[in-house]
Image (cartoon, rainbow, N blue to C red):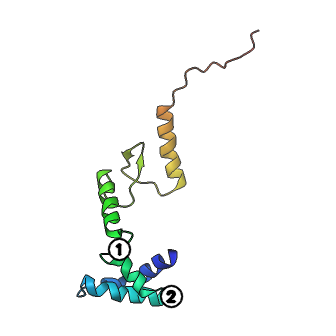
């Protein structure tokens, strides 16, 4: 899977330049490119992109997108803490720790500061 993803990233400019190509023409063209580069079977690849997609990829991606939109995801990165969307997503461990410690401190209220089973003098 990583090989395919890396190949896609390395060749995205080539894919985006195919502006005059129809989807029906693009699928075999792209399948041939990927099959040759990654030593895969072109016919199998084409079957994954076509209307007989055994994994129903198009429908699955649409469902994921709708789920994300309904959950409040509007772009990347998007993050939630306790189902609340963050205005700004931290990009470091210390940033996340600051948020999580703040949430924890606001929600944790000890019942008592007296230790149980303390010996009496």
Q: Position of residue 71 (x, y in %)?
A: 33, 50
Q: Position of residue 2 (x, y in %)?
A: 51, 74
Residue at the image point whose x is 31% and y is 57% from the top: 74
- Which mark identifies residue 39? 2
Q: Quadrant of the C terminus?
A: top right
Residue at the image point whose x is 39% and y is 85% from the top: 31
Residues at discs 2 and 1 in contact (Cβ within 8 Å) = no
Location of residue 13 with respect to 88 vertically, above or below: below
Residue wearing tag 1? 53
Location of residue 49 with respect to 28 vertically, above or below: above
**Secondary structure of residue under mark 1:** loop
How far apart marks 2 and 1 lie (CA) works out to: 21 Å
Q: Position of residue 56 (x, y in %)?
A: 35, 68
Q: Position of residue 6 (x, y in %)?
A: 48, 78
Give whichever of discs 2 and 1 has the lower sequence position: 2
Q: Nearer the viewer, residue 56 or 85?
A: 56
Q: Nearer the viewer, residue 78 or 19?
A: 19
Marks 2, 1: nearer the viewer: 1
**Secondary structure of residue under mark 2:** loop
Q: Is residue 10 visible?
A: yes
Q: Is residue 18 visible?
A: no
Q: Is residue 40 left or right of residue 16?
A: right
Q: Is residue 98 left or right of residue 114?
A: left
- Which mark identifies residue 76? none
Say few, some or many: other residues with alpha carbon within 10 Å of mark 2 (under 14 / 14 to 19 / 20 or more).
Answer: few
Q: Nearer the viewer, residue 39 or 37?
A: 39
Identity of the residue furthest to the top in this view = 121
């Amino acid at each position: 899977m990583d090989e395919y993803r890396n190949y896609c990233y390395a060749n995205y400019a080539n894919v985006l330049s195919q502006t005059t190509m129809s989807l029906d023409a693009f699928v075999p063209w792209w399948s041939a490119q990927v099959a040759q580069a990654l030593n895969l079977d072109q016919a199998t690849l084409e079957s994954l992109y076509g209307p007989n997609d055994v994994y129903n990829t198009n429908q699955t991606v649409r469902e994921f997108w709708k789920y994300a939109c309904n959950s409040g995801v509007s772009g990347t990165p998007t993050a939630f803490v306790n189902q609340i969307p963050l205005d700004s997503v931290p990009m470091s461990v210390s940033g996340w720790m600051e948020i999580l410690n703040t949430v924890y401190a606001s929600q944790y209220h000890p019942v008592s500061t007296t230790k149980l089973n303390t010996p009496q003098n």
